[in-house]
Amino acid sequence: MESDSKRKKECSSSPESTRQSFPDEVLERVLALLTSHKDRSSVSLVCKDWYHAERWSRTRVFIGNCYSVSPEILVRRFPNIRSVTLKGKPRFSDFNLVPHDWGADIHAWLVAFADKYPLLEELRLKRMTISDESLEFLALKFPNFKVLSLLSCDGFSTDGLAAIATHCKILWSEVKNLTELDIHENGVEDRSGNWLSCFPESFASLEVLNFANFGNNEVNFDALERIVSRCKSLKVLKVNKSISLEQLQRLLARAPQLVELGTGAFMQELTPRQCAELESAFNNCKNIHTLSGLWEASALYLPVLYSACSNLTFLNLSYAPLQSVELAKLLVHCPRLQRLWVLDTVEDKGLEAVGSNCPLLEELRVFPADPFDEEIIHGVTEAGFLAVSFGCKRLHYVLYFCRQMTNAAVATIVQNCPDFTHFRLCIMNPGQPDYLTNEPMDEAFGAVVKTCTKIQRLSVSGLLTDLTFEYIGKYAKNLEVLSVAFAGSSDWGMQCVLGGCTKLRKLEIRDCPFGNVALLSGLEKYESMRSLWMSACNVTMSGCRRLASEMPRLNVEVMKEEGSDDSHADKVYVYRTVAGPRRDAPPSVLTL
């Protein structure tokens, strides 16, 4: 009632209210149909009435940088939020380029949410720090809480997960409780494998359970089996490497309704009877469309999967070092595949099988099995990429790690698949030219941006001059994210990108010759972008200070390495903010 009165007061005080053509309730119902964060933000700019209607009707919020806004500003702007998605550290924290104590702690946000969003139901975090104390606070303060997703987060242990499990069901409440617990690619300290046993025996609401990244850490399988048996609505189950094939069979027998499955290790020695039981369990899972895990998969047991592959749309083999023959035999049974992740152990022959068997493929990611082995004898080349492009005309997302490439191959690939929106080519040897002509790879990426007019994310690599960036600035008008490493000739390259890519949101640069002139050429651009990252470039502290002084709505952070030149800016992170300089930066991070 109080919120309704506040809403009416706000709307009646707006000059536009006298010209409003339909009631607030109608407008809010229309706005409820908008699911895009961008669309809702645009709607809020139309007039004050629409601003207030959007403000009161919004229940979900996405924040791409936890320091771009403060918790206090958020809760004041949107009073009825039920779901929060929050991102923290820069992406380069995944490569240990960001200090471990950089920041992005969630606790201050939780304190604000407990006061203003007591009915919060969902929290999705990426690259945030969350302690066991924060997890317990979350479990105790939000009785309607249903969804917790942690991706690449740190700071917590299995004790924190035990607190979530212990308090996931309020016995006196009729409210449906925890439905999703998704713990993915996090640095979890394993203090006890018994956290799963903390779920109450009456708890049966879980729909998503993912603890695939727990490595070999043992979990209480009996507790897991009881959870799977009780939760009849469980749709997603992704277990860690410690779960054996025999245990997997028991889980599948109790959850044939699964639509997403992440297996444990796929290499246990089975008796013929156990193998038959496992195959039967997979055969009964008629609805699986996503399959992952398969750690160290043995070719001996891959056939047990075949009966469950007919409806697969996503196959993640990034932990399974399959050979080309094994992959080819598996793909024959996957006629509906749209997304495929593999290791480069499949080699070009394996990718030829992809081109032959996966006409509906839209996304391909090829990861290096051993990125640090320069003497590697296996891997993929331009030949495998070409084979995929000839057979998979719907391909629009690629992440491709290789050790050699040619301009001509890339030009042919994008001619075959002109609808690329994400093109991330990673030639692992820095500064590698076209290995046939010894020319720079400029024309390859020129072909990408000229042909693929829908390109939104681009990662460039190999020997590149400023010509590549001239092409990008001239043709990549829909580009939103650009990642650059070991490339460019001068400041002019970065200037071309900042001056030409009107929709650019994120620019990530490392080990490039760009300096202060390039940095300061983006003065008019940075406030419309989410962030800029520059490391191991030619930027100085004076250049960073000038940027900070001329653009006060930007946070300019410099991360200094021990023993580095005082005048040199080792790592620079620039982002827009309405919250001002942050107050929790460690000594190694200078906020200008």
Image (cartoon, rainbow, N blue to C red):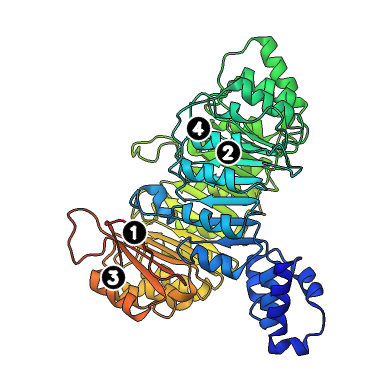
Q: CA distance from mark 1 to mark 4?
A: 30 Å
Instruction: Specify whether 150 is left or right of 485.
Output: right
> What residue type is disc 1 on?
Ala
Foreground label between 1 and 4? 1
Query: Does residue 338 appear to the left or right of 477 in the view shown?
Result: right
Q: Which residue is mark 3?
A: 515
Upstream in sequence: badge 4 or badge 2 = 2
Q: Secondary structure at mark 4?
A: loop
Residue drawn at 72 percent across, 26 percent down: 229
Q: Which mark is residue 164?
A: 2
In the picture of the structure, the residue carrying the numbered disc 4 is 214
Where does the N terminus fall, quadrant-wise?
Answer: bottom right
Which numbered disc flags the more N-terminal residue, 1 or 4? 4
Q: Position of residue 559 (x, y in %)?
A: 29, 59
Callout in the foreground (4, 2): 2
Pair 2/3: label in front: 2
Q: Amino acid at mark 2?
A: Ile
Nearest to N terminus: mark 2 or mark 3: 2
